[in-house]
Image: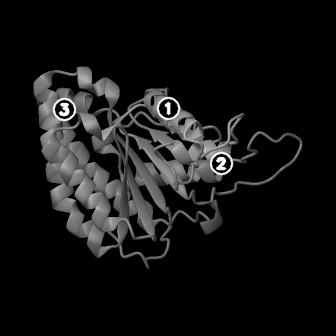
Amino acid sequence: MPETSTTADFSSGIAADRVPAHVAFIMDGNGRWAKARGLNRFEGHLRGVKTVMQVVENSFRFGIKTVTLYAFSTENQTRPAEEVSALMKLLKTFIGEYLPELLKNQIRLRVIGDLSWLPEDAANSVREAVSKTENFSGHTLVVALNYSARDEVLRAVSSYAEAVAAGTLPSGKPDWATFSRYLDTDGISDPDLIVRTSGELRLSNFLLLQAAYSEFYFCDTLWPDFSENDLRKALADYASRERRFGKTGEQIGNKKSV
């Protein structure tokens, strides 16, 4: 991973002010990648983890400040028990192996989702890594674990209602800035760009509220094969767009979120 002082390095000629501040990835295709090679699904997930680290490193090197990874959804709980168990072990190994890199490069780790469902050892590893990196500010790696946007909203509404009932918030219609503080992503900018691999064209219950004005990029590449060149293509496509944020008749340019 890069040092936080590393500057953007684009041979593609993308201007620095056209680089998205926050890119979120829906990492799809590990199972199909493995099946096409006669391997079991776990081998696909294992290869996908290697791609994760390459993509995160390249993203930060290119000037992206925040990277979000859709690692495990609440719907993934319905997968075969042996696959879920293997994924949880892989998660713990991933955290243990890359925590030194996060610390070395001063990368803040944030985790969104309901960690109460995770096995205790995996959840503890995640919480420890989050705690040890929470004061870093240069780059942020967000991992969505046991995450569902609808579940996030329900938890946020419940917490908000409890605050109103306790008198710490006024009753009545909330404004977005106040309500958004109860989402898992409090303190994290909305994604400028959401990338989904493997040819699927849907959000799959991912960051539904935060994606209100995100740009989307879909590609046929399976996640384990997603390369630096694929990332460059996604960023170049983003850079070519004009972002209006719901405004019409007014050209406001391709602005990054703050």
For the point 49% across and 26% down, which residue is it?
Answer: 202
Q: Earlier in the sequence, mark 3 or mark 2?
A: 3
Residue 120, position as x, y percentages in the image: 16, 42
Secondary structure of the residue carrying tag 1 is helix
Q: Residues within 10 Å of mark 2 (few under 14, many from 20)?
A: few
Q: Which of the marked residues, 2 or 1, is nearer the chain's N terminus?
A: 1
Q: Quadrant of residue 39?
A: top left
User: What residue do we see at 70% from left, 54% from top?
Assistant: 254
Residue 76 place in picture, x, y as percent? 28, 26
Mark nearest the camera among 2 and 1 is 1
Quadrant of the drawing holding the N terminus: bottom left
Marks 3 and 1, Cα distance to the nearest angstrom?
40 Å
Residue picked out by circle 1:
158
- Quadrant of residue 43 within the rendered picture: top left
Image side of residue 242 versus residue 137, left or right: right
Q: Which residue is mark 2?
A: 177
The mark lying in front, picked from 3 and 1, is: 1
Left or right: residue 76 versus residue 83 is right
* Residue 118 appears in the figure: yes
- Are the residues at dot 3 and dot 2 in contact (C-beta closer than 8 Å)? no
The amino acid type found where label 3 is placed reads Ala
- Callout 2 secondary element: helix
Please tell me the numbered disc located at residue 34: 3
